[in-house]
Image (cartoon, grey):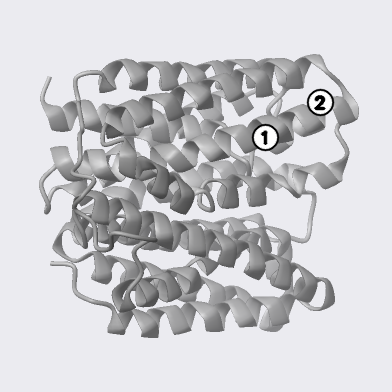
Amino acid sequence: MKTETRLGIILVGNKLSDLLLSAKTTLPTLLSSAGAPPWMAQLLVPIRESGALLPQMAFAYVMRKYPHRDLAWQLSMFLQFVSGCLMIGLGLTLDGHAAGYVILASLVLMSLSRALSSLTTKDIQGQHVDKGSRGRLLGSASTVSSLISISIAVLALIGSGRIGSDKLIVIAAIALGSKLICMWLMRPLKTEVDTQARAVSKGLYFDSTLAKFVTVRSLFAHTALLAPLFVLTYDGDMINILAYLIIAQGLANFFSSYLWGSLSDKSALACMRAGSAVAIAATFTLLVLPHYYPNLASSIWFVVGLFFILGIGHQGVRTGRKIYGVDIADEQHRTEFIATSNTVVGACIMLLGGIYAAINAYSRDLSLSLMLIGLTLGLLGSLFLKAEK
């Protein structure tokens, strides 16, 4: 099997597992079926996002002594598998607060493990895939995994209109099985980096290039923070729209991932800019049109349609910044560049999330307007980033 094919299958399996055990869809359903209190569901996304970003600076510092990135990746995948088994097994066995605490604790372990796998994956891609091909590989993997997840979601929703606990077991089994397949396929891809090839000998790398990238990426994080506001715009029974949102998210990834990947191979900066422009257009439409046509807020197709467009924009920003981080540096320098940016951005996401939550309690439109301004500033700021090619 060719190296790129093997790595592509691994990326598909890993992405599929993340989609099926999503903190936005599957895990809230698991909490609800276990009878856990609703406030616990509000912690899922912050734990999932910040837990996978904040530890990366510490991991990068520790990994200066351990050049074998494939072994670190295998460890992270094994811990994700274990945490997933605990999450699903005990989550469906226990009830109420006990089930909720187990699910949240397991998600913490899974998120920390994902921080390590995210960091080491960049080194593995950088060593085994040539610059100019990385975006298409990532885009193809996202496209295939999205198609599989859509198919599974549709099958799970047939008949009942929602995902029940019995179908959760099947979904979790597929997700966790994907982890094991990925671990088996990774065995031949030995990856050893030169840990001495770094920008600084003491402390962690930080310069003007990284500072600008962190600032722009933090502003572009609004594409993820906006998603709940798009969902909450719907003036109706949320159960009726959940299935459509899951499918819309998958379709957005399916239709756009390969195109974004191809664009990022030519210019990761152009990919980020185009993705942010799409997200800005969707947000502006959501902010303005309901004021002139109030009935749109009760239209499933209006909300889901804009959620789909936002998903396309988010995928463009996400793909562009991933390829930019891989292309802009090499070896241990790359590890520390990505780790430092991820840790700082993780802290910014937590801070911005708390601020917008407080503002949203006062005014949804004000929160939406500030996020739109943030995205626009990110687009303008990207013009000052260093060219990666």
Viewer-side residue, 314 vs 305: 314
In the picture, the disc for residue 327 is: none
270 left or right of 266 in image: right
Res 324 visible: yes
Q: Nearer the viewer, mark 2 or mark 1?
A: 2
Res 175 visible: no
Q: Quadrant of residue 232?
A: bottom right
Q: Amino acid at mark 2?
A: Ala
Up/down of 260 relative to 181, above or below: below
> Callout 1: helix, strand or loop?
helix
Report if the CB atoms under discs 2 and 1 are less than 8 Å apart: no
Say few, some or many: other residues with alpha carbon within 10 Å of mark 2 (under 14 / 14 to 19 / 20 or more): many
Measured from the top left, where is residue 216 in percent x and y? 41, 75
Whole-number angstrom distance, CA of label 2 to CA of label 1: 12 Å
* Residue at the image point whose x is 56% and y is 19% from the top: 82
Q: Amino acid at mark 1?
A: Leu
* Residue at the image point whose x is 35% and y is 20% from the top: 183
35 left or right of 388 in image: right
Up/down of 263 relative to 244, above or below: below
Measured from the top left, where is residue 146 in percent x and y? 41, 38
Say few, some or many: other residues with alpha carbon within 10 Å of mark 1 (under 14 / 14 to 19 / 20 or more): many
> Callout 2: helix, strand or loop?
helix
* Residue at the image point whose x is 59% and y is 76% from the top: 371
Measured from the top left, where is residue 63 in percent x and y? 36, 41
Viewer-side residue, 65 vs 333: 65
Up/down of 307 relative to 14, above or below: below
Per the image, the residue denoted by label 2 is 99
Per the image, the residue denoted by label 1 is 27
